[in-house]
Image (spheres, coloured by chain):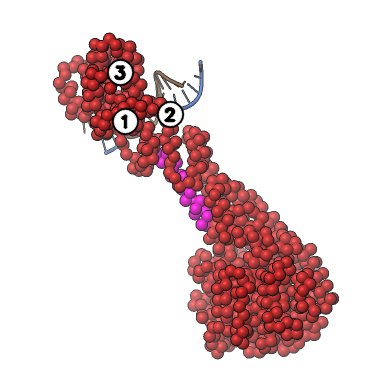
Chain colours: A red, B blue, C brown
DNA sequence: GCATCATGTCATCGA
DNA sequence: GTTCGATGACATGAT
């Protein structure tokens, strides 16, 4: 990574344009922006100001490479930008380039990508020739080490059998590297671990060694081998995903060595265009490690990490299953979304995997995380890809663990970092994982998944409970299934649901068959209340006398329709707005609908009695008539029950006044009115109940849909946050590993940490005040990252 | 004969 | 105080 950037910068300074974008099929602008745009070569960096800002702790002019400085600044700036978080994808693309190269190197499967990567490596190598060797602390000495490091990358070449870089390496070196690699792999240690440990060793070695000193190639190799051995001793970490190597200090900085070596190799073998994998030894090693997991032994390191998270995965799986049932298509779309695709592809195919992880390839730590993510996602179907990590804080932590061990800050520092890195909750997420991993600090990252998991579990339970409730509430299975089916549909209530009252259906058909007069319907509608229209009734009676079959068929029809018409259910007011239309039909209407020729009211029966031909119908009417109707007939009530019931109070009183009625008749009429009104009221009440239930059903459906949508969005956010976290890790590591004190020695992560202040400056602070002071002066480097 | 459902009826409450 | 609507509880009839 460094090598590539530096090489790019160098070329840009020289005037040679390195069109890295050409190597990338997509997303060129971001890459160019990152590599070329912000680079020191293109940006007018004020060197003097830069050094001034160091406030006495400026990097030693000879020990630190200016480009490195700039690279660091740029990376820090990227880190800052992460805090603001626009779209992470852009930056990720840049890293993808490197990643591709790494993948190619390791897998050696793809020719073209490998070239790209090689280019990147070559670029970095070229950097050294720029005079960086002198600048880098202990750069000169590690050359032999560089060769060894270079050998690491060549392994991939060796596999490919096409690398020129191997030429420089002796067979012994290559064999040794191979053996070491295999040992590490067998032990379960990821190569990234190996790389990082190498780094650590570098730093350790550099400390004692004078920057100006040059170590013999043998010594370098020994140190490097030691680093390898150490890594071999760390396989446990590799299994758990924790990078123990970080804790192992004392590894010489192979970066500079590797760069020098790469430069040398490049000069010797390749023209500028040709890239050697040696670019940044660290990078190469990381790349190899990263690649190693997917290509050679996919999941060896990852499998152990996944194991502890299985319980939660089960819950998640359940949730996912339910979600899949509830919103199959939606979730499928989600799974097929670009993110998921990329992730899944990355996990499945080594190339894409490399690409995906490649985003962070240059960074030492994040690669394991990426691989974990990708592999994990690959293992899980569709939507599950997102959930596991999202809802598995453990898994997340495990994947991040390596860094945590490496850069575990003190609680105080961590808190500071949290505070400094942003006021928003999201910013806390971007704090390097090691910070989050600290016991006191685990606030943001670890906490994030829990609420989600809980929420999801709740939602899952809600889904189930709602369905059960729907079933228990008396919904038919068809309705319940419909309820489920409607979860994804935007349509409102189905017409079928309105048909739940089964009884009216038959009568409805009969009503519809009968011809209705507009006048009667109008009257009825104007009544607004129960379907008893005295006027229509009277008219019907009158018509009845003349025409047998014309007895207000429309009346009953309207009544029925008012009650049964599904449209009413569609137009169901919301819970608070249920209107009382009082349009329920009365049982009489049904009787009349079935027997339109029958008289409607008792009063008419007397008239009918006159007609012998209606006598059977009269019996039938009596049979179907309500008790009140029969009572009214028996009591000789002069007017119909409909009138009694539906007339306004005033008219009703007038009607009573007109007729001289006995006490019994008066009482019966009042009872009939009361019961009739109550009957209608009961019908309306039931209708309202039903409407309420249906509305609730609809509301539940809408809420479920919204919830599913929100969950989807949440998943996407979490995914992007995770990516940004990883990017943040990588950038943090990148920046931190490139930092050098005035003597050109790297800052041990165990003692120092980067802190991001609100004013935009980045400070390197000792983790423990006492510790930091003991070893070094209370170094407080401030770099102005503003550009 | 029993269970279930739809409907009617009563009693009660509140506007 | 009366009327009316709403509603729970119960009864009744049909299936």
Q: Are discs 3 and 1 both within one chain? A: yes
Quadrant location of residue A774?
A: bottom right
Residue drawn at x 31%, y 32% is: A583
The residue under label 3 is A598
Q: Residues within 10 Å of mark 2 (few under 14, many from 20)?
A: few
Contact between marks 2 and 1 (CB within 8 A): the answer is: no
Q: Secondary structure at mark 2?
A: loop
The residue under label 1 is A558
Subunit ID for the residue under disc 3: A
Residue drawn at x 55%, y 51% is: A331
Residue A293, horizontal then vertical, whole percent? 72, 64
From the viewer's perspective, tell me whether residue A476 is left or right of residue A31: left
Please provide the residue range marked out in magenta.
A692-714
| Quadrant assignment for the N terminus of chain A | bottom right
Q: Earlier in the sequence, mark 2 or mark 3?
A: 2
Residue A419, horizontal then vertical, whole percent? 52, 70
Q: Secondary structure at mark 3?
A: loop
Contact between marks 3 and 1 (CB within 8 A): the answer is: no
Subunit ID for the residue under disc 2: A
Q: Nearer the viewer, residue A31 or C10?
A: A31
Subunit ID for the residue under disc 1: A
Residue drawn at x 28%, y 25% is: A552
- Real-space CA distance between mark 3 and mark 1, rounded to the nearest whole angstrom: 18 Å
């Amino acid at each position: 990574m460094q090598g590539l950037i530096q090489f790019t910068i160098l070329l840009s300074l020289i005037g040679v344009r390195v069109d890295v974008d050409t190597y990338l099929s997509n997303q060129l602008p971001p890459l160019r922006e990152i590599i070329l745009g912000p680079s020191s070569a293109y940006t007018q960096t004020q060197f003097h100001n830069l050094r001034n800002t160091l406030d006495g702790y400026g990097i030693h002019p000879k020990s630190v490479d200016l480009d490195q400085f700039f690279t660091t600044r740029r990376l820090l700036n990227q880190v800052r930008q992460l805090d603001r978080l626009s779209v992470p994808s852009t930056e990720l693309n840049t890293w993808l380039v490197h990643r591709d190269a790494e993948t190619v190197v390791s897998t050696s499967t793809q020719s073209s990508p490998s070239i790209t990567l090689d280019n990147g490596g070559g670029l970095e190598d070229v950097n050294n020739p720029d005079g960086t060797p002198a600048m880098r602390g202990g750069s000169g000495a590690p050359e032999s080490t560089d060769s060894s490091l270079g050998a690491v990358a060549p392994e991939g070449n060796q596999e490919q059998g096409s690398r020129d870089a191997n030429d420089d390496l002796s067979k012994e070196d290559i064999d040794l590297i191979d053996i070491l690699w295999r040992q590490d792999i067998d032990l379960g240690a990821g190569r990234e671990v190996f790389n990082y440990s190498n780094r650590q060793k570098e730093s350790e070695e550099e400390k004692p060694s004078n920057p100006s000193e040059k170590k013999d190639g043998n010594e370098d190799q020994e140190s490097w081998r030691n680093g390898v051995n150490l890594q071999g001793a760390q396989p446990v970490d590799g299994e758990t995903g924790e990078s123990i190597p970080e804790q192992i200090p004392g590894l010489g900085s192979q970066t500079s060595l590797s760069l020098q070596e790469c430069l040398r190799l490049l000069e010797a073998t390749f023209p500028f265009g040709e890239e050697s994998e040696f670019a940044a030894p660290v990078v190469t090693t990381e790349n190899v490690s990263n690649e190693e997991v997917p290509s050679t032994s996919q999941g060896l390191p990852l499998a152990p990490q996944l194991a502890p998270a299985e319980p939660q995965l089960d819950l998640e799986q359940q949730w996912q299953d339910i979600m899949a049932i509830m919103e199959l298509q939606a979730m499928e779309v989600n799974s097929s979304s670009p993110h998921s695709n990329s992730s899944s592809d990355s996990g499945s195919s080594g190339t894409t995997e490399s690409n995906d992880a490649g985003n962070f390839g240059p960074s030492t730590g994040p690669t394991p995380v990426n691989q974990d993510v990708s592999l994990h996602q690959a293992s899980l179907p569709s939507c599950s890809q997102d959930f596991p990590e999202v809802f598995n804080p453990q898994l997340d932590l495990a994947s991040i663990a390596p860094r945590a061990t490496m850069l575990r800050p003190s609680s105080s520092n961590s808190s500071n970092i949290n505070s400094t890195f942003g006021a928003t909750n999201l910013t806390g997420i971007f704090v390097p994982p090691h910070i989050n991993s600290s016991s006191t600090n685990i606030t943001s990252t670890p906490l994030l998944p829990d609420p989600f998991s809980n929420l999801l579990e709740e939602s899952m339970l809600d889904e189930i409970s709602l369905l059960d409730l729907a079933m228990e509430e008396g919904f038919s299975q068809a309705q319940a299934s419909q309820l489920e089916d409607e979860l994804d549909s935007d349509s409102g209530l189905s017409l079928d649901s309105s048909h739940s009252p089964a009884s009216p259906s038959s009568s409805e058909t009969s009503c519809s068959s009968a011809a209705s007069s507009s006048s009667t319907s109008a009257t009825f509608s104007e009544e607004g209340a129960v379907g008893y229209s005295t006027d229509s009734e009277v008219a019907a009676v009158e018509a009845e006398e003349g025409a047998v079959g014309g007895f207000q068929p429309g009346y009953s029809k309207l009544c029925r329709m008012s009650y049964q018409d599904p449209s009413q259910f569609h137009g169901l007011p919301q819970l608070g707005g249920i209107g009382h239309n009082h349009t329920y039909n009365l049982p009489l209407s049904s009787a009349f609908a079935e027997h339109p020729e029958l008289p409607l009211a008792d009063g008419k029966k007397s008239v009918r009695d006159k007609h012998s031909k209606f006598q059977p119908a009269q019996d039938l009417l009596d049979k179907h008539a309500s008790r009140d109707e029969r009572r009214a007939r028996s009591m000789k009530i002069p007017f119909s029950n409909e009138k009694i019931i539906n007339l306004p109070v005033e008219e009703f009183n007038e009607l009573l006044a007109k007729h001289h009625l006995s006490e019994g008749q008066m009482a019966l009429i009042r009872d009939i009115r009361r019961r009739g009104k109550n009957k209608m009221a009961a019908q309306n009440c039931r209708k309202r109940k039903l409407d309420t239930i249906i509305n609730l059903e609809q509301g539940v459906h809408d809420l479920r849909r919204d919830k599913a949508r929100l969950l989807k969005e949440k998943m996407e956010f979490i995914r992007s946050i995770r990516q940004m976290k990883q990017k943040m890790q990588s950038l943090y590591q990148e920046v931190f590993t490139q930092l050098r004190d005035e003597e050109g020695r790297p800052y041990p992560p165990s003692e120092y940490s980067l802190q991001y202040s609100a004013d935009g400056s980045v400070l390197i602070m000792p983790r423990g005040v006492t510790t930091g002071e003991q070893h070094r002066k209370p170094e407080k480097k401030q770099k102005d990252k503003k550009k």
